[in-house]
Image (cartoon, helix red, strand yellow):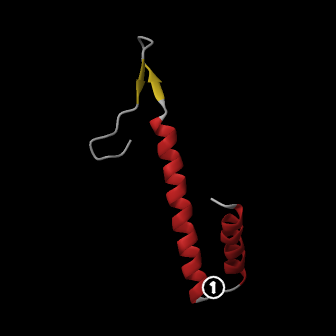
Amino acid sequence: MENSKLNRINELARIAKERELTAEELAERDVLRKEYIAEWRRGAEQVLENTYIIGPDGKKRKLQKRANGRK
């Protein structure tokens, strides 16, 4: 995520501590938060896709997805 967007999220958090956010600011904050969470999840998935487990026999194996689609 771009630093400018992270800075804006932080700025809106500071403003929210001082006063109530306007409807436009709330909407902007929600969009930025959703974008941040989606990007974080993509990064976490990439890490898990490149993670290997070394078994007691010394063999490496990839993590398998769970039946419900989660890792």
Element carrying mark 1: loop
Q: Where is residue 61 in the image (x, y as percent from the top left)?
A: 40, 23
Quarter of the image holding residue 71? top left
| Left or right, 7 with reference to 68 | right
Residue drawn at point x = 63 percent, y = 85 percent: 21
Q: In this view, does 56 lie above or below 37?
A: above
Q: Where is residue 42 in the image (x, y as percent from the top left)?
A: 49, 51
- The amino acid beneath tag 1 is Leu
Q: Position of residue 57 (x, y in %)?
A: 41, 11
Q: Is residue 28 above or below residue 65?
A: below
| Left or right, 54 with reference to 18 | left
Which residue is identified by label 1?
Answer: 21
Q: In this view, does 18 lie above or below 44?
A: below
Residue drawn at point x = 31 percent, y = 40 percent: 66
Question: How many numbered callouts?
Answer: 1
Q: Is residue 19 above or below residue 5?
A: below
| Left or right, 68 with reference to 30 | left
Quarter of the image holding residue 40? bottom right
Q: Position of residue 30 (x, y in %)?
A: 54, 74
Residue drawn at point x = 66 percent, y = 61 percent: 2
Instruction: Count residues near mark 1 (Cα–Cα under 10 Å), then give few for <14, some for 14-19, many for 20+.
Output: some
Direction top: furthest residue: 57
Direction bottom: furthest residue: 22
Q: In which quarter of the image is the N terminus?
A: bottom right
